[in-house]
Image: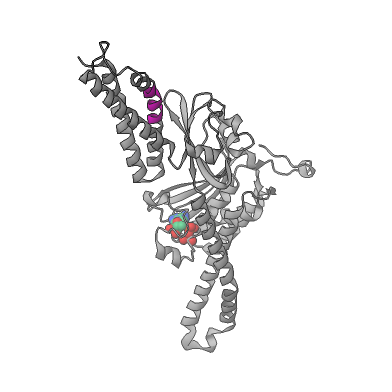
Amino acid sequence: MKNPVVGAWKLPLALAGGLLVGALGGWLAGGHVAIAVALVAVAEIVLLLTHLRHIVKPIMSLPSTSPDGTSDPRHDRFMMRSRRLAANLHDLRRAAGSLPDAIVLLDQEQHVRWFNHAAESLLGLRRPQDRGVVLKERLHNSELAGWLEEPSPEPLNDVSAPGAPSRHINVTLLPFGARQRLLLARDISHMSRLEQIRRDFVANVSHELRTPLTVIHGYLELLDPEDVPHLAPVLNEMRAQSKRMGQIVEDLLTLSRLETQDHVSEERVQMAPLLATLRKEAEALSQGRHSISVENVANIDLLGSPKDLHSALSNLVSNAVRYTPTGGRITIRWERSAEGANYSVTDTGYGIPADHLSRLTERFYRVSSSRSRDSGGTGLGLSIVKHVLGLHQARLDIRSTPGQGSTFTCCFGRERLMAPETHESRSSDSNLG
Ligand code: ADP
């Protein structure tokens, strides 16, 4: 007769095997989603194994002979299979335990139910005393603890690991099972070291190029094309290119500075005069080729860095002018929104195909290189805009229809708004946050 306990193993074992294959597949396939899926699968295996252990243990302790003292071949086969199963379970458990990323299974009150070895080194959890503790209390005073307080936290990028402060981790919380959660902490120390090297390299090269470029540009400006008419076209081209190189270097230095900053100065940015300046800049760049209008319906100021905000907002205006053919319309609008206030620049220009939109803020990403170069672009403008907005907890929204035009919107939160100055309020600034 079929042993019902043996039958009961088959389903969970098959499930465990399937999940492990899925986990390994996901792991090998690479990519965050695949890894997250793989880790959830591994976590399920761990729970399954914990469950199966309770079945295997009593079986292993059964006597090996039948009651009359003789050896039963069916019983021997059964015992052999049990031992093989126990060894497999042990291996699977060890495999899950030795993954390089920290995994912590949490119940709905955030009690720690299980964690692997990497969670000991990266998060500082200890066995057995940390089983059952509330994770955010155990990690108190760390950035992670504050993050765990949030009801549905977004992934936390590049934070110091509580168990090894010199290491950097990315942390994600995934829903799992019946209102349980799985915390995954990925060691990205190597990646952030490489990123740091890249940042330093770009900043150093840009800095070193700045002086020779200034000298070359200065000499080119001294030469008068009228003195050497046969070289005039060459000279003009050299001037234009050295100016462009100078602008690229300046933009790279700005980006390097923004990347290393984690906050901005908190000053009043008066929007009415800033909008007037932006209009003048647009008109100077357009040289009468476009109709330009400004609508200030928000009547509110911003809190942040005047220099960086000016640079970001004017970048959008200059793009609108450069990517809108003669005769087009450009509208700069400052208005209230449900979350705070929006600054938008709408043009009736070339527009951008949908498949480019998500990549526009990458460095040197251009929809059309020749159009960008001809219009004097460096390919770094929107990257600067994104960084400036990030430092002001704002985001960039891009809508565009090829052949019809685009709208670039900077969405600011309420905490960044300030009531405009009146005679009475001039001595005491008020934040609307
Ligand atoms: P660039 O200096 O090349 O303008 P940006 O980072 O400012 O660099 O913009 C990246 C690319 O996005 C541009 O090369 C251009 O293809 C596209 N782009 C930006 N703004 C607009 C716009 N208003 N209309 C159409 N395309 C735009």
Q: Is residue 324 visible?
A: no
Q: What x and y, as percent, mark residue 294?
A: 57, 50
- Residue at the top extreme, as displayed: 68
Quadrant, the C terminus: top right
Locate residue 297 relative to residue 45 in the image: left or right: right
Is residue 47 one of those drawn in magenta?
A: yes
Q: Main secondary structure of the magenta part?
A: helix
The answer to which image quadrant residue 89 occupies is top left
| Residue situated in front as seen by the camera: 140 or 350 | 140
Q: Residue drawn 37% across and 46% down? A: 30
| Residue situated in front as seen by the camera: 1 or 206 | 1
Is residue 132 one of those drawn in magenta?
A: no
| Residue situated in front as seen by the camera: 309 or 209 | 209
Indicate whether 336 appears above or below 292: above
Q: Residue drawn 57% across and 84% down? A: 223
Q: What x and y, as percent, mark residue 226?
A: 53, 86
Indicate whether 50 appears above or below 40: above
Indicate whether 332 appears above or below 115: below
Q: What x and y, as percent, mark residue 239?
A: 52, 77
Q: What x and y, as percent, mark residue 376?
A: 49, 66
Q: Residue drawn 56% across and 84% down? A: 224
Chain part drawn in magenta:
44-53
Q: Is residue 363 visible?
A: yes
Quadrant, the N terminus: top left
